[in-house]
Image: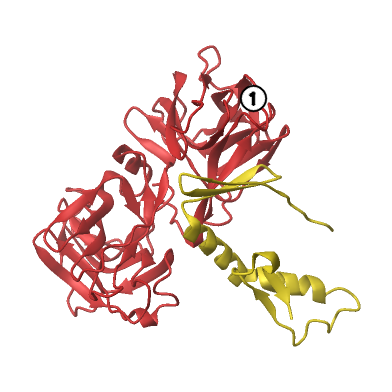
Chain colours: A red, B yellow
């Protein structure tokens, strides 16, 4: 038997207040953005995923590059691809089609890093008119979503000087088979209908073969369990496609702000005996509306550009949003809720047991 | 020590609010409610206390703020923070 109390996979996102996208304006030829990260493996990196903020006028061309780091941690301006450069020139359109969307910039040549190699992805000015009337903003971080990061981190180049940033970086790395970093396109902030029985939940499947059974004793999530007012009694639940497994009723008056979004909740089930869940089977953990008047529930999350981007977050494609309309579950594999499982135990095929927290967040 | 920042642009495009600053940061809000929530969260954090501390710790002002109330009011754009 092995016990790993407090097990956390990846860095847990901790919204602090209402997150908002923080864009850097590239309106001079010595402006830019960068993301420092480590390679997760020796698989060729093919794309840099970056969220485009807003276009003004006719944007100039920019260049995306994978670079090494100086001893001070800034981009060293040397393409790690050497004779097979990664650098790719791209030009945002002079219209609104890119605004607020994630863009996948395909590198000119894929770069195969060593596992754990420290790299930095940059976007700088390349050519064309760049000024106050012709520029672009790029979202290189999210304010109010995990504070005071040390690494990985974003950087901003302003008037030729790089500055490291402590806010949650907004970027991604794409290989042929996976994604990493923290790619995103928007923040999920859509409250359910105030209809009794409606649910918002994280649908999760722990891969078959990685254990035999598990028990979930609670859920950590970020969201809002009540609508316009408190004094509601939403159900925090664990469900399967077949029906209800565990529930606990939460009095929203116990919350510091039941109708405020992006608040963190640790809620435990109250069953005397927890149900053993199977690996390889999908379950749902989240909230259910119990009041038809202002009782809508909200499970906050990250809205991704595509389901493939789930790979960048703990659980990968096995953890995403699902909503229930009283009859059917509807999956949305482009939303990764801020929700984690608090495990009572996990039994392996050999009989071992671990306990802990399956974390959601920045990396896995 | 003086710290300042200038708001250089406020735009509403497709319902989103964009507020740009002289350090080239542009904050993006999905809608008006999100922008208001951002301000409210900031004001209910340490911002009001920081304003009070900045005034109070100066020599000659050590008791200037005792008993006075610092108010952040989203409804009063011209006087968002006031000391009374």
**In this view of the protein, which residue sits in the foreground, B32 or A145?**
B32
Name which residue lies at 20% across and 56% down.
A348
Q: Quadrant of residue A351?
A: bottom left
Q: Position of residue A30 (x, y in %)?
A: 69, 29
Relative to B16, residue A73 above or below:
above
Name which residue lies at 13% across and 57% down.
A328
Q: Quadrant of residue A58?
A: top right
Q: Position of residue A133 (x, y in %)?
A: 64, 31
**In this view of the protein, which residue sits in the foreground, A265 or B58?**
B58
Q: Quadrant of residue A355?
A: bottom left
Q: Is residue A309 left or right of residue A95?
A: left
Q: Position of residue A263 (x, y in %)?
A: 43, 67
**In this view of the protein, which residue sits in the foreground, A126 or A13?**
A126
Q: Position of residue A265 (x, y in %)?
A: 38, 70
Label 1 crowd (10 A; few <14 / some 14-19 / many >=20): some
For label 1, the residue is A77
Specify whether residue A54 is in view.
yes
Pinpoint the chain carrying mark 1. Answer: A
Q: Residue furthest right?
A: B60
Relative to A343, residue B55 above or below:
below
Q: Is residue A87 left or right of residue A260?
A: right
Q: Residue furthest bottom?
A: B67
Name which residue lies at 86% across and 73% down.
B58
On-image quarter of the N terminus of chain A? bottom left
**In this view of the protein, which residue sits in the foreground, A160 or B12?**
B12
Dot 1 falls on a residue whose secondary structure is: strand
Specify whether residue A3 is in view.
no
């Amino acid at each position: 038997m092995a016990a790993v109390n407090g097990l956390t996979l990846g860095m847990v996102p901790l919204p602090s207040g209402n997150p908002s996208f923080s864009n850097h304006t590239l309106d001079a030829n010595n402006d830019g953005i960068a993301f420092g990260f480590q390679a997760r493996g020796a698989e060729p990196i093919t794309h840099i995923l970056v969220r485009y903020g807003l276009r003004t006028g006719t944007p100039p061309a920019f260049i995306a590059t994978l670079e090494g780091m100086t001893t001070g941690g800034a981009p060293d301006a040397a393409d790690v691809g050497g004779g097979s450069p990664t650098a790719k020139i791209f030009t945002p359109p002079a219209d609104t089609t890119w605004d607020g969307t994630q863009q996948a910039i395909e590198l000119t040549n894929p770069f195969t890093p060593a596992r754990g190699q420290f790299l930095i992805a940059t976007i700088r000015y390349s050519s064309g008119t760049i000024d106050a009337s012709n520029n672009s903003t790029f979202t290189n971080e999210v304010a109010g979503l995990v504070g005071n990061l040390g690494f990985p981190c974003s950087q901003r180049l302003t008037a030729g000087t790089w500055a490291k940033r402590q806010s949650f970086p907004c970027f991604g790395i794409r290989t042929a088979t996976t994604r990493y970093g923290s790619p995103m396109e928007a923040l999920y902030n859509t409250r359910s209908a105030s209809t009794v029985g409606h649910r918002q939940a994280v649908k999760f499947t722990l891969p078959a073969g990685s254990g035999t059974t598990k028990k979930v004793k609670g859920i950590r999530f970020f969201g809002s369990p009540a609508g316009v007012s408190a004094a509601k009694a939403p159900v925090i639940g664990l469900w399967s496609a077949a029906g209800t497994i565990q529930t606990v009723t939460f009095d929203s008056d116990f919350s510091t702000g039941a109708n405020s979004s992006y608040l963190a909740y640790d809620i435990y089930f109250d069953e005397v005996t927890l149900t053993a869940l199977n690996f390889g089977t999908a379950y749902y953990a989240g909230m259910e509306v119990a009041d038809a008047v202002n009782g809508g529930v909200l499970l906050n999350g990250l809205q991704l550009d595509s389901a493939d981007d789930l790979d960048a977050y703990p659980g990968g494609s096995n953890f995403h949003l699902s909503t229930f309309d009283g009859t059917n579950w509807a999956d949305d594999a482009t939303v990764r809720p801020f929700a984690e499982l608090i495990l009572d135990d996990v039994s392996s095929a050999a009989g071992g047991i671990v306990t802990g927290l399956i974390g959601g967040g920045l990396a896995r | 020590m003086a710290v300042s920042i200038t708001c250089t642009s406020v735009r509403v495009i497709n319902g989103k609010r964009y507020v740009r600053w002289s350090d080239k940061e542009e904050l993006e809000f999905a809608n008006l409610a999100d922008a208001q929530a951002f301000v409210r969260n900031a004001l209910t954090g340490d911002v009001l206390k920081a304003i009070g501390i900045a005034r109070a710790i100066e020599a000659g002002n050590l008791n200037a703020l005792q008993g006075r109330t610092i108010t952040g009011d989203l409804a009063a754009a011209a006087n968002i923070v006031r000391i009374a």
